[in-house]
């Protein structure tokens, strides 16, 4: 998110950086804001650093709203922001001022940052949720009313027809490129690779036609009808910035979408699979390739069909997260360190073991099955958003 700081000609850039050093540092580090002073373009957020900048704002303003202003009150900043807000109201433009302590401004900014970034998001639902997901749906009207997130139904027959229409030459180029990236190819044949690449190209085409920012798919129907899987397609789409989840799980897809928009991170959607007093192992058959140090191309675990990803994740810090409930009113988040990237034929292809005991949560209060894993430590960032928005932590 871009912030343009407005100051009067009576002050200097150096004054602004020194006067607001703590707040600007937190906006940059905690909120990933890009900051400039007296820039010549209308940004996402305008920070008023001094009085006397009202006409400067008026010159910048492009006529689009809503407008967010930051003013902590020093140097006549709040007075100027109030004048600007009143002018905006006269133009019929919605606006608001973030005001208070640095903690209060940062907390409200996080909420604004995410809510703004979700406005206009389009999610494609390729078929209905898988039959076994009896507690993973989201109220679609609630998504639209509270977040501006639109959901679009995509008939699976449209996808199946699209897979058939993809040329062998186009699919072969994709398949060859993925094989080159892999350290090994085990079960999949050349024909399997070709069909998985066709599924990727067909899904991607629909995402482009429908202008989708995210998608989830009733993937086992594709396995049965087309003899291939969407595991490779979802991995590649996530790499390319289209948040992609499987089994039609909307709660997990919203978790993935949140961390992408809020933390700038790709997410591994996985099943908790083995729990001990000190560790939790999670596994699934698709993962963004960007998250992996190495990858092996395998068949899909349950069906033995198509192409799946056996990824080796780096031994580093991770965040485990789930945002759930029909109205997204619950969440769980914690941080952990990877202790092993095992492989067993009893679980889905990509597996990771983390040094955290999730048994009290998972066995008594779990928010559904799937959870997401993100590289790095993001728990505090997520909690700040949740504190503003109001979901109940587990």
Image (cartoon, grey):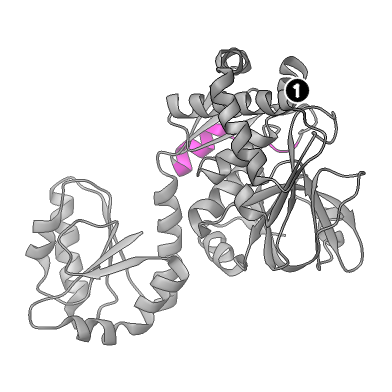
Within 10 Å of disc 1 (Cα), the crowding (few <14, some 14-19, many 20+) is some
Q: Nearer the viewer, residue 130 or 53?
A: 130
User: Looking at the figure, which quarter contains the N terminus?
Assistant: bottom left
Image label count: 1
The residue labelled by disc 1 is 223
The picture quadrant where one finds residue 43 is bottom left
In the rendered structure, the answer to whether residue 308 lies left or right of residue 342 reads left
Look at the numbered disc 1 and give the secondary structure of its residue.
Answer: helix
Task: Work out whether residue 263 can be spotted.
Answer: yes
Q: Which residues are magenta?
A: 135-147
Q: Residue at x 81, y 38 (%)?
A: 186
* Residue 107 % position (x, y): 46, 68
User: Compared with residue 327, is residue 126 higher up or lower down, i.e. above or below?
Assistant: above
User: Compared with residue 187, is residue 146 higher up or lower down, i.e. above or below?
Assistant: below
Q: Residue at x 80, y 27 (%)?
A: 305
Magenta includes 82? no
Q: Nearer the viewer, residue 110 or 14?
A: 14
User: Compared with residue 369, is residue 291 higher up or lower down, i.e. above or below?
Assistant: below
* Residue 175 % position (x, y): 63, 32
């Amino acid at each position: 998110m871009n912030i343009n700081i407005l100051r009067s000609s009576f002050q200097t850039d150096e004054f602004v950086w020194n006067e607001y050093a703590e707040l600007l540092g937190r906006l940059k580090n905690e909120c990933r804001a890009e900051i400039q002073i007296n820039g010549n373009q209308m940004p996402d957020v305008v920070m008023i650093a001094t009085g006397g900048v009202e006409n400067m704002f008026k010159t910048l303003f492009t006529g689009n709203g809503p407008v967010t202003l930051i003013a902590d009150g020093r140097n006549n900043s709040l007075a100027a922001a109030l004048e600007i807000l009143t002018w905006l109201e006269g133009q019929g433009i919605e606006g608001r001022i973030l005001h208070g302590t640095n903690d209060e401004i940062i907390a409200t900014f996080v909420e604004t940052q995410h809510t703004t970034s979700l406005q206009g998001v389009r999610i494609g639902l390729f078929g209905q949720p898988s039959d076994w997901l009896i507690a993973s749906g989201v109220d679609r009207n609630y998504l639209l009313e509270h977040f501006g997130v639109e959901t679009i139904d995509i008939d699976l027959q449209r996808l199946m027809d699209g897979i058939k229409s993809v040329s062998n030459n186009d699919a072969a180029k994709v398949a060859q490129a993925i094989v080159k990236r892999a350290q090994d190819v085990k079960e999949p044949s050349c024909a399997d690779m070709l069909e998985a690449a066709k599924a990727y190209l067909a899904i991607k085409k629909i995402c482009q036609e429908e202008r989708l920012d995210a998608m989830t798919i009733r993937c086992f129907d594709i396995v049965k009808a087309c003899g291939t899987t969407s595991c490779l397609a979802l991995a590649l789409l996530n790499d390319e910035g289209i948040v992609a989840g499987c089994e039609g799980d909307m709660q997990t897809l919203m978790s993935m979408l949140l961390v992408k928009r809020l933390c700038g991170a790709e997410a591994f959607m996985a099943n908790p699979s083995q729990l001990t007093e000190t560790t939790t192992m999670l596994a699934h058959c698709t993962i963004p390739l960007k998250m992996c140090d190495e990858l092996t191309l395998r068949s899909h675990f349950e069906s033995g069909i198509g192409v799946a990803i056996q990824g080796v994740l780096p031994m580093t810090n991770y965040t485990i997260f789930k945002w759930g409930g029909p109205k997204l009113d619950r969440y769980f988040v914690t941080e952990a360190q990877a202790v092993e990237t095992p492989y067993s034929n009893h679980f889905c292809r990509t597996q990771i073991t983390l040094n955290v005991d999730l048994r009290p949560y998972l066995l008594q209060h779990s928010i559904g099955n799937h959870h997401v894993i993100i590289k790095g430590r993001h728990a505090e960032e997520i909690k700040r958003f949740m504190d503003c928005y109001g979901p109940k932590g587990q």
